[in-house]
């Protein structure tokens, strides 16, 4: 049981050829203790009491326990040979690679064997952080046109629509907005800042190899920004990806999606992959007859090219280049971008270019020691219109990180240290469409332009202690010098303790820090008559996050099962609070008021079992308590449900020829803000007088049939055709004072049927 | 109520898929089959899973079973749908030797380290 949990390390290594230069939280094989089991070669019975020691040093030795298992930290030096001795058996010497060792000891003359197995459970038993893994197989459970849909079969991450017009989707972790979780692509921070509103559309599902979701505080290596967690997206690796993957998808709203992945090895050392995506929705659909498009017309072209060079002698370089162009148009049915007429419309056009280079060198004979240089740069530029308002912006980001990792004496003590330099140039122009005759041109310029330049040099260090048995402690500290906000100290701690053979306890604590982008993070509210009132002296957001998880692996119905519960508390010292409650016609954005509180408490329990061979069942319950002080009142965060249920049944026949999937998502009541149209009515300002959305459940289902090269899938989202009755308040007069499309808590377009296929050349 | 109706619909969907599989298994008992035994370069249980899955997607294959210690793959197939040559090619394209024919180079490179033929059977 415990063996396969630990074996995930094998996969981790495979995925992290760049050594320690850019890994997530998982300990890679070069520093993880060697684990294994000693067996009798003929009877396969465990051999307790066998002595396991390194050939090179005589000091580090251990004996196998009653199950015959052992765990031993690695010594410095290149010799990785282990000697295993036991009375009555022949001594054996084996090489300790990255995987779990299974050493059969012979009573007589055959050679020793080493067995390496691999299997990846969705909750890792290895990482010091609470990490959930979404594999590419999980990704095929839903249509997965883009990243937003990737989380549909997962309970930890919420995906919500920001408003009823633009169709933008946001993720939430621990009940906090996506902006509070760090999104990384191949372990480099990506899609930050102004890219936040539509970022989930910018990565196509078929490009993704896997997703790691880390709840709570993670590593200091990737910066100070993560507060609620980290979502790391692993794109297809050039040397391992399929030669060709073609994916086509169409749904009954008229949206089409085409993806083409190509990969090739040019030489033994150089490989490349080209990832292409396009999607198009050209049909105007208004199923709820409110005069507004249920989904905006959209066209996207997206390309990514990745190169990898592996010298085979410790030197690895990876280069990635990406370009994206997207246009969207939503609003009233009669709206046309070139001839708006009297109609309300929203338009967006985005151009994004990104590139990175990662280089790492691993010392020969010392797999635990490496030096890495990570460089990335992004240019994100967009123009958008929401009725009379326009919001344009450019963000240019560059980030350089130099990272060294090694051990102190043995692999029981490892450290990573490095330097980073972040340069961020934000330029935003927000025009309300109104001119005030009293203001000077300079005043207007200041009102409409929000420019910010950040230059943040920093240094960090992370020390990991792991004893070979059951304890891993990761302590990290980083110090940054922000050109606008001075010195920032970010301490973080992760502890993992294996309380029993199949029981894992984890603790995570630390501090996060970020500078808010009040407009980009509230674009949904732009589709409303609410006036944005942004306080002039916004301070950076600071929060502490403390939490932990309990994971129990057990056997149910004769197969492996997992129970995981976790609890996280995030307490903000300062937050840029978005207040829709205090004034019905305004959105007040300002610092957390003095003496006020803002916190999030999140509890989740999830069980995964396999009651019948081939049938995987997942059930989860989540409790969220997210509150902030608004104008002296501690109120729940708007649109965040307090209770959530999740159920996923996945059935696969032998060899995955048929796969069927059913997901049920239940949402509890969510607090809503009073509509702008209700201004003048007397509202009490405590929780009991807030309007709430009803409870509801959504059902998604999908069926896949696999052939040798082809896969065909069909599915239905929102089977019951559940819809929010009036997603747009005041839809009859979108330029009037009652208009509000931001209070969206349920599906807008109802049931969606889709059909798709994949063609693969391995 | 509507919710329940949909729930049953979905359960129905799940069952139909299971039924569909059962059908293909039932068909297997029909026409005459032949058996082919191949010596492969498979070395472990992961190889076994990979080979058996790959063969399951080959036309005309009723059953494929690898005995890891002896490296022998036993394939039950319908001679009217496939040939021993086609089956050998399928094994090669999965990255393994089939009798004296060596594995497809690219498929072999894609195998994880533990599944390469330089390892002894484990």
Image (cartoon, coloured by chain):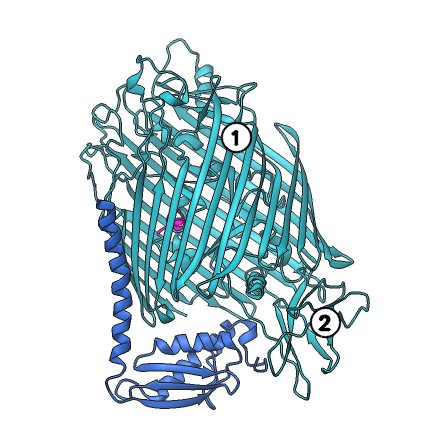
Residue B8 figure quarter: bottom left
| Residue marked by disc 2 | A49
One can see residue A292 in this view: yes
Measured from the top left, where is residue A418 in percent x and y?
68, 47
Chain in blue (letter): B
In the visual, does A56 lie left or right of A677? right
Please name whichever residue, A49 or A128, is drawn nearer the observer in this view of the structure: A49
Above or below A382: residue A462: below
- Magenta stretch, residue numbers: A145-151
Placement of the N terminus of chain A among the 4 image quadrants? bottom right
Above or below A295: residue A303: below
Chain in cyan (letter): A
Of marks 1 and 2, the one in the foreground: 2
Q: Residue at x 59, y 75 (%)?
A: A115
Above or below A755: residue A511: above
Mark 1: which secondary structure? strand
Measured from the top left, where is residue B1 in percent x and y?
22, 44
Mark 1 or mark 2: which comes first in sequence? 2
Q: Which residue is drawn at 73% across and 57% down?
A: A412
Residue A146 is a magenta residue: yes
In the visual, does B27 lie left or right of A384? left
Mark 2: which secondary structure? loop
| Residue marked by disc 1 | A599
Measured from the top left, where is residue A224 in percent x and y?
60, 38
Placement of the C terminus of chain A among the 4 image quadrants? bottom left
Residue A244 is a magenta residue: no
């Amino acid at each position: 049981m415990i063996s396969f949990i630990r074996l995930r390390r094998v996969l981790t290594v495979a995925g992290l050829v760049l050594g320690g230069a850019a890994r997530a939280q998982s300990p890679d094989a070069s520093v993880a203790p060697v684990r294994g089991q000693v067996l009798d070669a003929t009877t396969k019975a465990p051999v307790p009491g066998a002595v396991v020691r390194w050939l090179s040093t005589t000091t580090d030795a251990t004996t196998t326990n009653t199950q015959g298992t052992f765990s031993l930290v690695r010594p410095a030096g290149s010799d990785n040979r282990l000697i295993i001795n036991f009375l009555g058996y022949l001594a054996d010497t084996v090489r300790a690679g990255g995987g779990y060792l299974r050493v059969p000891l012979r009573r007589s003359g055959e050679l020793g064997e080493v067995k390496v197995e691999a299997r990846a459970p969705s909750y890792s038993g290895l990482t010091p952080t609470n990490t959930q893994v979404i594999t590419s197989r999980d990704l095929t459970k839903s249509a997965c046109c883009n990243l937003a849909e990737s989380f549909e079969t997962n309970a930890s991450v919420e995906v919500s629509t920001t408003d009823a017009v633009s169709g933008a989707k946001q993720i939430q972790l621990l009940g906090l907005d996506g902006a509070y979780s760090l999104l990384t692509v191949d372990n480099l921070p990506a899609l930050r800042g102004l890219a936040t509103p539509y970022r989930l559309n910018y990565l196509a599902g078929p490009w993704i190899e896997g997703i790691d979701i880390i709840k709570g505080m993670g590593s200091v290596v990737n910066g100070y920004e993560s507060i609620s967690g980290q979502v790391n997206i692993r794109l297809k690796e050039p040397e391992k990806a399929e030669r060709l993957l073609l994916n086509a998808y169409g749904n009954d709203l008229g949206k089409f999606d085409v993806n083409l992945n190509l990969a090739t090895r040019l030489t033994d050392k150089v490989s490349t992959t080209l990832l292409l995506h396009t999607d198009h929705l050209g049909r105007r659909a208004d199923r709820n007859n409110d005069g507004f498009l249920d989904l905006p017309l959209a066209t996207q072209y997206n390309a990514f090219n990745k190169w990898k060079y592996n010298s085979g002698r410790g030197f690895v370089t990876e280069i990635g280049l990406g370009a994206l162009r997207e246009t969207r148009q939503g609003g009233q049915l009669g709206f046309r971008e070139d001839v708006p007429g009297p109609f309300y419309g929203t338009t967006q056009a985005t151009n994004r270019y990104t590139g990175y280079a990662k280089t790492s060198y691993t010392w020969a004979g010392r797999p635990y020691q490496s030096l890495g240089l990570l460089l990335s740069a992004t240019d994100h530029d967009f123009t958008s219109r929401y009725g009379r308002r326009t919001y344009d912006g450019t963000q240019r980001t560059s980030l350089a990180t130099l990272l060294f990792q090694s051990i102190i004496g043995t692999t029981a003590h490892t450290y990573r240290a490095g330097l980073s330099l972040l340069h961020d140039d934000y330029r935003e122009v927000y025009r309300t469409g109104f001119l005030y005759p009293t203001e000077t041109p300079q005043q207007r310029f200041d009102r409409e332009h929000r420019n910010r330049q950040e230059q943040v040099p920093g240094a960090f260090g992370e020390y990991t202690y792991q004893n070979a048995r059951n304890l891993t402690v990761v302590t990290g500290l980083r110090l940054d010098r922000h050109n606008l906000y001075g010195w920032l100290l970010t301490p973080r701690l992760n502890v993992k303790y294996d309380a029993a053979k199949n029981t894992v306890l984890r603790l995570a604590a630390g501090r996060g820090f970020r500078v808010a982008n009040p407009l980009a993070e509230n674009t949904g509210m732009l589709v409303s008559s609410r006036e944005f009132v942004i306080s002039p002296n916004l301070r950076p957001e600071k929060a502490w996050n403390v939490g932990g998880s309990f994971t129990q692996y057990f056997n149910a119905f004769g197969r492996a099962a997992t129970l995981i519960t976790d609890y996280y508390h995030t307490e903000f010292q300062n937050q840029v609070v978005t207040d829709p409650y205090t004034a019905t016609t305004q959105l007040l954005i300002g610092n957390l008021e003095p003496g006020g509180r803002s916190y999030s408490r999140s509890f989740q329990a999830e069980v995964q079992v396999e009651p019948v061979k081939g049938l995987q069942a997942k059930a989860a319950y989540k409790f969220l308590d997210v509150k902030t002080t608004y104008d002296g009142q501690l109120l729940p965060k708007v649109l965040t449900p307090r209770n959530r249920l999740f159920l996923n049944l996945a059935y696969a026949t032998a060899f995955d020829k048929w796969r069927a999937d059913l997901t049920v998502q239940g949402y509890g009541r969510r607090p809503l803000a009073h509509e702008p149209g209700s201004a003048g009515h007397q509202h009490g300002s405590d929780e009991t007088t807030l309007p709430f959305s009803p409870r509801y459940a959504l059902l998604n289902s999908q069926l896949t049939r696999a052939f040798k090269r082809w896969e065909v899938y069909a599915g239905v989202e929102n089977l019951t055709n559940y819809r929010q009755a009036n997603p747009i308040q005041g839809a009859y007069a979108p330029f009037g004072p009652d208009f509000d499309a931001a209070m969206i808590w349920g599906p807008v377009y109802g049931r969606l049927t889709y059909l798709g296929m994949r063609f693969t050349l391995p | 109520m509507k919710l329940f109706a949909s729930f049953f619909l979905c359960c129905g969907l799940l069952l139909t898929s299971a039924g569909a599989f059962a059908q293909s298994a039932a068909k297997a008992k029909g026409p005459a089959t032949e058996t082919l035994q191949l010596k492969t370069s498979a070395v472990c249980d992961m190889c076994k899973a990979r080979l058996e899955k790959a063969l399951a997607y080959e036309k005309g294959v009723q059953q494929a079973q690898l005995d890891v210690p002896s490296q022998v793959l036993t394939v039950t197939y319908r001679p009217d749908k496939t040939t021993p040559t086609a089956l050998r090619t399928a094994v090669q394209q999965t990255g393994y030797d089939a009798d004296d024919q060596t594995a497809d180079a690219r498929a072999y490179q894609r195998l994880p380290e533990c599944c390469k033929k330089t390892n002894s059977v484990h």
